Amino acid sequence: MRTVIRFPVPVSIYARASAVGGTESDGPLGALFDFHDETDRFGADTWEQSEESLSRTVLNLALARAGESQDAIDLLFAGDLQNQCVASSGGCAAAGIPYCGLYGACSTSGEGLLLASLALSASPALSRAAVVTTSHNAAAERQFRLPLEYGGQRSPTAQWTATAGGAFLLCHASEPFSPPSAPRITACLPGAALDSGVTDGANMGAAMAPAAADTILRYFSLSGESPSDFDRIVTGDLGAEGSALLLELLRENGLDLQGRHRDCGVLLFDPLKTDVHAGGSGCGCSASVLASLFLPALERGELNRILFLATGALMSPSCLLQGESIRGIAPLVVLESGKTGGEK
């Protein structure tokens, strides 16, 4: 991408919601989530159906917060970790909203926000769009590794797929129904799929960190801005391993985030209470943390500007068995507080 995409009319996130499982609700952010299910079942019989129910639940929570029906939404961008994104399509199918299925692995929340913003900005015929992303630990383990019942050992660099989801309702910031304090997306920068040669499926942080560094460096080079222009630079799902590598890569390129960096995979769990090894991951990790922690801080005016990069490891179990490496990606959106107008 040769330039940062700036929106002449900012895109407002006028409603958001989060929902998590039992382990996530016991973490440091537990009191901030809108809904949790200690059983991780969300009223369903199988883990795959549980994620469908989670997707449906978090979308309905966001609609209820906005006081709107499903018919109000013109376009839905949704994704998950299951094959062919069946959790999001199945979970949201009853809503009857025109649906664009997304797969960006753990970067899906950022990808969804970016694409929904582009769609709203490109077409005045669109009034409202929704973004929904979820992940479920038990469903993801069965698909990408081994069922939980197998009891396989995890390496120290492995991350814990979050049972979590986030939903976001977007519109033009000029719409009269958008609250004045609603956070705004003012710019975006698509990520590039970057292959750094990592072949260890238990170290996704190492595969994603170079992609996050690439997007951050490109953004500051193209925008002329610096880390000091942002209160927080938030990555999704790098975990402890990937976060340390990201900061090292940026320092090697002359960029110091000066304590501004936060990672959703690190924030979601307390490693002293829950053995999640290197931290959280999954589509729902960054989505739930953004919806429960960072967007409310922007709404209250406690934070002014955030650089948000959801990070994804584009991996296939079959390809890993064939010796292929994992590509990372990190789409970026600029979030500003509507309460303060994004002014420094």
Image (spheres, rainbow, N blue to C red):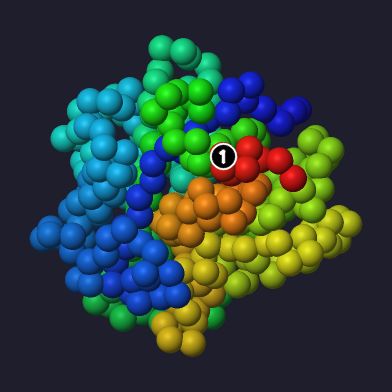
Residue 230 visible to the viewer: yes
Percent coordinates x, y for residue 62 in the rendering: 31, 44
- The kind of secondary structure element at disc 1 is loop
Q: In this view, does 305 lie to the left or right of 55?
A: right
Residue positioned most to the bottom = 272
Residue 254 placement: quadrant: bottom right
User: Could you tell me which residue is drawn at 20 percent across and 28 percent down?
Assistant: 96
Around disc 1, counting alpha carbons within 10 Å, would you say few (fewer than 14), some (14 to 19), or many (20 or more)?
A: many
Quadrant containing the C terminus in the rendered view? top right
Please state if 83 lies on the left or on the right of 306 as rendered: left
- Which residue, given by chain and number where applicable, does mark 1 sit on? 338
Q: Position of residue 147 (x, y in %)?
A: 28, 69
Q: Nearer the viewer, residue 70 or 264?
A: 70
Q: Where is residue 206 drawn, in percent x and y?
A: 63, 64
Q: Which amino acid does label 1 sit on?
A: Gly
Query: From this viewpoint, which residue is outermost toward the right?
Result: 254
- Relative to 20, does residue 11 appear above or below in the rendering? above
Q: Nearer the viewer, residue 214 or 260?
A: 260
Q: In this view, does 151 lie above or below 57?
A: below
What residue is rendered at 27% in x and 26% in y? Answer: 72
Instruction: Look at the image and tell me in which quarter the N terminus lies.
Output: top right
